[in-house]
Image (cartoon, helix red, strand yellow):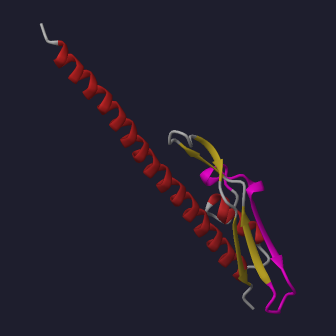
Amino acid sequence: MKSKRYQSRRGAALVEAGLTLSLFLTILFSIYDFGWTLFLHQSLVHRARTAARYAAINPGDLTGAKNLVLYNQTTAGTLANFGLQPANVTVTRNGTAGTTEDRIKVNISGYQFLMITFGFAGTHTGHPINLSVPVEN
């Protein structure tokens, strides 16, 4: 039979292991969430830049630019990437044609992402992405 002293050490080791494991998992999940959020944001910024460049060269095809953000192609697809909805993306042309104020504006807002870290778990809404480029004349 094992002594009470041995059993109390074993119990303390289990408590320490539980505390260490919970801290380790929180840090691990936080790194994952940060990486996913950064990837999603940078991917959407890249899509917005691509759409703005396309619309700057083809200012009459703003729908194609919007489709570039949503489907990564100028024609409409069946399933938008990253869970975006058409209402999340706006592409507008502002200013007078032929002047330096003639600009294409791309706005991505209301997109959602999921976090799994304890205390932050759930669906969150990302910050709006706004981009403006001049129209090529």
Q: Nearer the viewer, residue 131 or 67?
A: 131
Q: Is residue 62 above or below residue 5?
A: below
Q: Is residue 107 magenta?
A: no
Residue 110 is drawn in which quadrant?
bottom right
- Name the residue at 65% across, 55% down: 126
Return the x and y of residue 11 as percentages of the image width and height. 27, 21
- The quarter of the rendered structure image containing the C terminus is bottom right
| Residue farthest toward the front in the current orientation of the protein | 5
Quarter-of-image position of residue 131: bottom right
Horizontal arrangement in the rendering, residue 123 relative to residue 62 (left or right)? left
The foreground one among 34 and 44 is: 34
What span is in magenta? 77-102
Task: In the displayed orientation, state which residue is furthest to the left.
Answer: 1
Question: Residue 49 in the image: x percent, y percent?
Answer: 63, 73
Q: Position of residue 61 (x, y in %)?
A: 77, 73
Q: Residue furthest top?
A: 1
Quarter the N terminus occupies: top left
Left or right placement of residue 96 versus residue 8 in this view: right
Q: Residue at x 41, y 47 (%)?
A: 27
Residue drawn at x 22%, y 22% as measured from the top left: 10
Which residue sits furthest right? 96
For the residue pair 23 and 87, the one nearer the viewer reads as: 23
Left or right of 61: which side holds 52?
A: left
Question: Where residue 123 sits in the image (x, y, percent)?
Answer: 63, 43
